[in-house]
Amino acid sequence: MLLWSKFYSPTLKEVPSDAELKSHELLVRGGFIRKAAAGVYSYLPLGFRVLEKVTKIVREEMDAIGAQELLMPIMQPSDIWKVTGRWEDYGPEMMKFKDRNKREFTLGPTHEEMVTTLIKGELKSYKQLPVILYQINTKYRDEIRPRFGLLRGREFIMKDAYSFHATNNSLDQTYQDMYEAYSKICERMDLKFFAVEADTGAIGGNNSHEFTILAENGESNILYCDHCNYAATDEKAEYLPNYGESKEKEKPYELVKTSNVRTVEELSIFLNVSKSKIVKTMVYTGRNGIFMVLIRGDLEINEAKLKAYFKDQTIRKALPEEVMETFKVQTGYLGPIGAKCTLISDLSVKKMRNFVIGGMKKEYHYINVNHERDFEVSKWIDVKKVVSGDPCPKCGKALKMKKGIEVGQVFKLGTKYSKKLDALYVDADGSRKPFIMGCYGWGISRTLAAVVEQFHDEYGIVWPRSIAPFEVVVTVVNSTNSKQLEVGTQIHDALEGESIETLLDDREVSGGFKFKDADLIGMPLRITVGRALKDGKVEMKLRSSEDVMKVDILDGYEQIVRRAKEMLDTYRP
Ligand code: ATP
Ligand code: MG
């Protein structure tokens, strides 16, 4: 019997001072989580119930596609990470420590090295493949800005799966199965989501989708098309470049004094030209040194596209002092004429004529510049940050943008890890080959926050039925009234008898206080035992609706259970 008076669920009136997002505020105020340190949380009984339900859904969908659960150590020796190069490459997000014998370890941020080492030498033959292994385990990442409660933690719970294949077709099949399993997980939680094409970033590989839950305050931007099924993250998004040919005749270029006018904004006012007549020169640096990237003045560069094109994750904007040292001129006056470095240009510049560009001299810009005639671009590539309104790369219709939260990502890794770690199987012809691999992460703890971000109102959380901590709360308005308490208890027992998880609010606090708490915590159905009992009635109300239904208790408790089931079946958060 679950009595709220005995249930440990401290709720708070005040908004926690570090809560920037509603999900963070509501999970703390509702007594689901408590902070231990930045990005490190305890799950209280309410939060743990939700966590367990999310875990169960994810586990069921993994099992359904033949993935096998195991559990790997969080503490991982450094040597396997040194073999793949990620001991250095992973960067400061990786938590490292030494044992008493000065041996180095990490608290695993992910498990590609671990799982590949685990199966190496024991998973032997093509006949055994494919094999899909997964775990539900705690991960550690020392995020620069742990924030938003469970959304970006330093200690968090992830489901991570890894698949091993002999052929690309087999990998494609598992990738597809995972994609469908992830869609089902979202659907079982009633979530509005997009599966979007994603950049593969530092993890490598050549194909990836992110599962993104729509939420106004999400950190991910997704571009999608209403007309065809195209959808991608803003890092990955492409578009149809359809820049018109300019009819202008080439004019001779001139160096003009622009004084301390440096930004595109200022320059367009100063010279009285539109921003699309200006070319911006940006400087980046990577493994092959410093290089320039040109783009039309009113557009932005997407750094992820540069990194992906050059397959170089170390690419970053050059610092002002690096720019000064190389070009002897400040950013703001940079341009390609006379610059001795690799010159990359975005496609947006290709058809421009007589444009404005930095003069490579303090306080000067060139006007009427034309590429080919005045400078040579070594590579024309798409590095533009796609924005809403740009033409869809598949069908040309205008793309739209929405914000969301990434909850899961699927990757085709290929042989990146198996080659480096020398994990081989014996193929049908007797030759030894590296496993073809895939990896598939799902943020279990992040899901709690993402769901609340999508489903809340001004009073609190509106949980989807499948992961609500309880399906029903029976609110006894005056728990010192023995008749009310008696009826409430009967209803609670009748519901529990039908396996409907029910919490009985028997606390000796005001009715108003109980209603507020019930709304804050967000159970799908509330059954109120209060004043209407004089007329033999109780009230039933869904969390997502204002409608109150009065039900006669004289019809018997089975009637109430039947009604509760009907209402829960129609309920949507
Ligand atoms: P992000 O871009 O948000 O940092 P990621 O690309 O680093 O995510 P993955 O390495 O693909 O994430 O991890 C798989 C899943 O783990 C993510 O889809 C997300 O749901 C979850 N996750 C990643 N980082 C965190 C974190 N710091 N806190 C909570 N969940 C996280
Ligand atoms: Mg990350």
Image (cartoon, grey):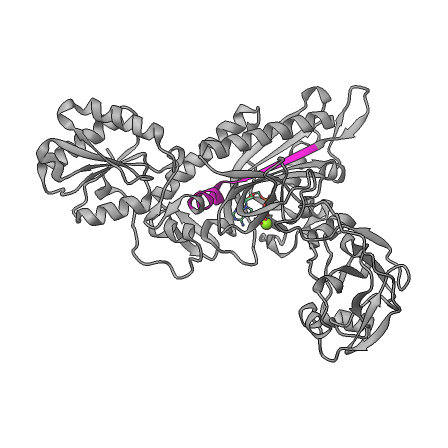
Q: Nearer the viewer, residue 568 or 377?
A: 377
From the viewer's perspective, is residue 425 above or below residue 25?
above
Residue 263 as seen in the image, left or right of residue 561: right
The residue sitting at the right extreme is 373
Q: Which residues are magenta?
A: 437-452
Instruction: Please name the residue shown 50% across and 46% down the image.
Output: 156
Q: Position of residue 539 (x, y in %)?
A: 20, 35
Q: Nearer the viewer, residue 423 or 507?
A: 507
Residue 313 as seen in the image, left or right of residue 501: right
From the viewer's perspective, is residue 223 above or below residue 432?
below
Query: Quarter of the image containing the C terminus?
Result: top left
Q: Does the magenta segment cover residue 271?
A: no
Instruction: Please name the residue shown 15% across and 23% down the image.
Output: 555
Q: Is residue 127 visible?
A: yes
Q: Position of residue 486 (x, y in %)?
A: 13, 33
Residue 151 as seen in the image, left or right of residue 297: left
Q: Does the magenta segment cover residue 438?
A: yes
Please tell me in which quadrant of the rendered image residue 495 appears: top left
Query: Quarter of the image containing the N terminus?
Result: top left
Instruction: Please name the residue shown 75% across and 40% down the image.
Output: 420
Instruction: Please name the residue shown 63% across and 51% down the image.
Output: 387
Q: Position of residue 160 (x, y in %)?
A: 57, 37
